Image (cartoon, rainbow, N blue to C red):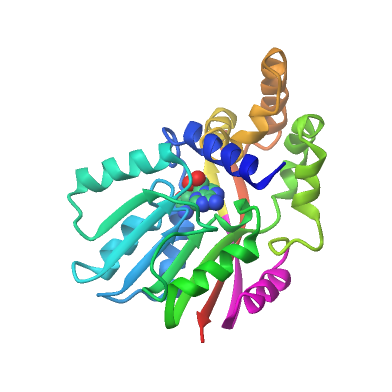
Amino acid sequence: MSETDLRESVAGLFDRSSETYDAVGVEFFPVFARQLLEDVGLKPGEQVLDVGCGRGAVLFPAAERVGAQGRVTGIDLSPGMIERTVRDIRERGLANVTAEVMDAQEPTLPGASFDVVLASAVVFFLPDPVAGLRAWHGLLKPGGRLGVTMFGGNDPRWSGVERVFRPFVPPAMIWAMVNPESPVVSPENFERALGTAGFTTISSVTREYPIAFSGPEQWIDWSLSHGQRVFWEFVPDELQQRVRSEVLDELDRLREPGGGIVMRQVVRYTLAKRG
Ligand SMILES: C[S@@+](CC[C@H](N)C(=O)[O-])C[C@H]1O[C@@H](n2cnc3c(N)ncnc32)[C@H](O)[C@@H]1O
């Protein structure tokens, strides 16, 4: 797939997810966003760029931390995400936040103008992550900080669910997820990519979170509300019902005594500086 096609399909995927993103009653992206802000240590008055801002999991708490003297700029490839986030900015009456449609890999923003660049759960969507990192390096003031989150491995107990989807997933996507040369496949590769892009003082921490679902149906709603939706979209219409019932069967096996399901999510946090 060409870079242009990849961008179009990612933007479309998140347009279709944007209405229910972070809105199905599962505590997910905001948990990692709060920890990222804690790690980066945002200060009042700072100028912040949130790349791939989505529905504002990072954007809104960052705006609170930098206060009225600071500013947070959100950019995202998906017009659907931006439309809804701009609506939320207006409804909250925030004067120190903006959000606009822009490609995070080729941002058209003034160089050396941000104290902090944040990217939560975004880097692995870029066609060329190193090009994105180079661009973000150029947007930071000297001494500016970068904070990134990425997902680690999947919960091994979900292998049954993954097996249901596997026949429909294009081999190129499976390869992209395991390619040992990929800059996002491991903390070591990602730290090397940051060095190549010019960053210094690089450090990574991995944390694991229990993510609670009321039951299999809520897991399915959640999986349709963000990037994982792509796996449902690979399934032809005539097989959707069959796949859904196979997924429900797999998830039933994971129920806890109270009927809910708990998924272990590994998240990698990486911090770096523009020297
Ligand atoms: C998993 S969501 C994360 C959103 C938000 N950072 C959060 O923590 O909830 C990934 C976001 O990255 C955006 N995205 C993917 N590729 C992008 C690109 N090349 N440029 C800008 N945004 C991009 C998607 O549209 C989506 O909103």
Is residue 65 placed above or below 91 in the rendered structure? Answer: below
Q: Measuring from the top left, give residue 87's x and y in whole percent.
A: 27, 40
- Residue 269 lies in magenta, yes or no? no
Please report the residue visible at 61 percent of the width from the left and 54 percent of the height from the top: 126
Q: Which sits in the foreground, 145 or 79?
A: 79
| Residue at 25% across, 70% down | 70
The answer to whether one can see residue 258 in this image is no
Q: From which residue to which does the magenta span run?
A: 186-209
Q: Find the residue positioned furthest to the top.
A: 238
Nearer to us in this view, 210 or 32:
32
Residue name at image x 67 percent, y 18 percent: 240
In the depicted structure, whether residue 259 falls above or below residue 59: above
Tally of numbered tags: 0
Query: Looking at the picture, how far across and down is residue 82, in whole percent?
Result: 38, 43
Give yes or no for residue 194 being in the magenta stretch: yes
Q: Left or right: where does residue 94 sit relative to residue 256?
A: left
Rendering quarter of residue 110: bottom left
User: Which image quarter: residue 133?
Assistant: bottom right
Position above or below: 251 against 3: above
For the N terminus, the image quarter is: top right
Q: Residue at 58% of width from left, 36% of height from top?
A: 223
Residue 43 visible, this orientation: yes
Instruction: Tell me residue 222's x, y (percent).
Output: 53, 36
Residue 181, horizontal then vertical, whole percent: 80, 63
